[in-house]
Amino acid sequence: MNKTVLAIGLGITVPLIVILALGFGKDPNRIDSPLVGREAPPFELTPVGGGSPIALASLKGKPVVLNFWATWCVPCQTEHGMLQQAAKSMGNHIQFVGVVYDDEDARIQDFLRRHGSGYPALVDKGGKAAIAYGVYGVPETFFIDPRGKIVAKYEGPLSAEILTGYVQQLMEAK
Amino acid sequence: MRIAAALLALLSLAAGPAGAAEEETLNQFLVQQVGAPAGRPLAGAELEKRTSEVASLVRCPVCQGSSIDESPSTMAQNMKRQTHELLAKGYGEEQIIRYFELAYGEFIREKPKSDGINLMLWALPVLVVLGGGLGIALSLRSGKRPEAPASAGKAPGRDELPESPELAKAVLKVRELAYGWPGGVSPKTSSPERS
């Protein structure tokens, strides 16, 4: 075969195969967050049931586990108990914050009464905080280092093992 | 259009008025991310028209192939409402899309930008066609045989003689013996031809 033709053929097919091979290795439903490695979008949200708004800026100096959730979301219910336990055991070192997305105050209060409330649950009316964080659906959890930088994002319900792994990452970023 | 405006107003009411502190934090963040509003604040029918136009350029993050203008999902409706608010504050189309892009990535654009890796995706089919054409042209060129001389494959006439004098002499001798022509020359022609 002519060498020039072979070179042109390889020049076209090899990059295509490389691109496809890289693509096949990824979950097509997963899109990496452009926020990881950047400063966490600030927010100032009112807790469920009222009270003074809580600002992310006021939590600087401590690693933050920011969990977007809703009472109507079954996976959120699954991880809720584990997050409460984690907040109880790690609360001295890490600040857990819940942001409730697209939900009603009364339903949230009822849910927290029945399932426990170990850390602030903030209401995101209009979903602006969720949009600023590029949330696709709940549950989604962001791990923010003490300087306010997003270290990682996790989509889906957290298990104790997954949470521990991310918390270690957060502590190392300290 | 009036129905759409009424629907947006209802949605805004349903979301409830954001607290002053929440609004101020968001405003500061917006300016930090995309700069101060680049245009004039819109209102009325123009605001509704532009909301729909800009929303049609933003992909719904939780839907399959629809924009936030047409999707009924809560996320899309929230994003459309925020687009409405930002246009009313004077933010421009590119500023609004950029704000969503910073949170969701370039995926959020209904019309991807034609630079970087995207430019390669646009150019690749053209390059493949050009490369293929070049390959075929080179292949045809290298496989082409040299043209045969006009006389190739043509049998010499009975009266023609080779150019070599020795060979011509031998041919004439053979003709004399074979055909009985005196001197090997055909009786039809007075003088033998040379090829």
Image (cartoon, grey):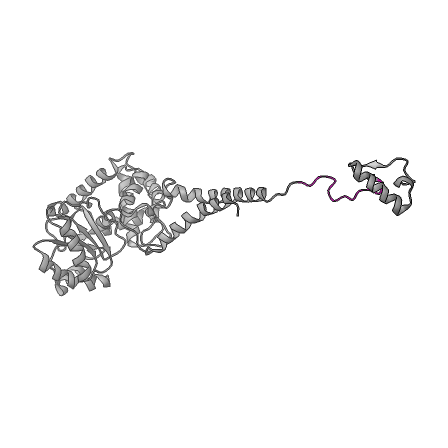
Residue B180, position as x, y percentages in the image:
91, 45
**Residue at the spot 23% in from the left edge and 62% down from the top edge:** A75
Q: How many numbered marks have been drawn onto this rendered protein structure? A: 0
What are the residue bounds of the magenta stretch?
B147-159
**Can residue B158 be found in the magenta stretch?**
yes
**Can residue A94 be found in the magenta stretch?**
no
Position of residue B169 in the picture relative to residue B76 (left or right)? right
Residue A144 visible somewhere in the drawing: yes
Position of residue A125 in the picture relative to residue B194 (left or right)? left
**Residue at the spot 22% in from the left edge and 37% down from the top edge:** B31
Viewer-closest of B194 and A122: B194
* Residue at the far left in the pictured view: A92
Position of residue B96 in the picture relative to residue A79 (left or right)? right
Residue A156, position as x, y percentages in the image:
24, 59
Residue A46 visible somewhere in the drawing: no
**Residue at the spot 52% in from the left edge and 41% down from the top edge:** B134
Residue A34, position as x, y percentages in the image:
26, 46
Chief SS of the magenta region = loop
Residue A117, position as x, y percentages in the image:
12, 60
Viewer-closest of B52 and B96: B96
Q: B36 above or below A77?
A: above
In the figure, residue B173 lies in which quadrant?
A: top right
In the figure, residue B156 lies in which quadrant?
A: top right
Viewer-closest of B188 and A157: B188
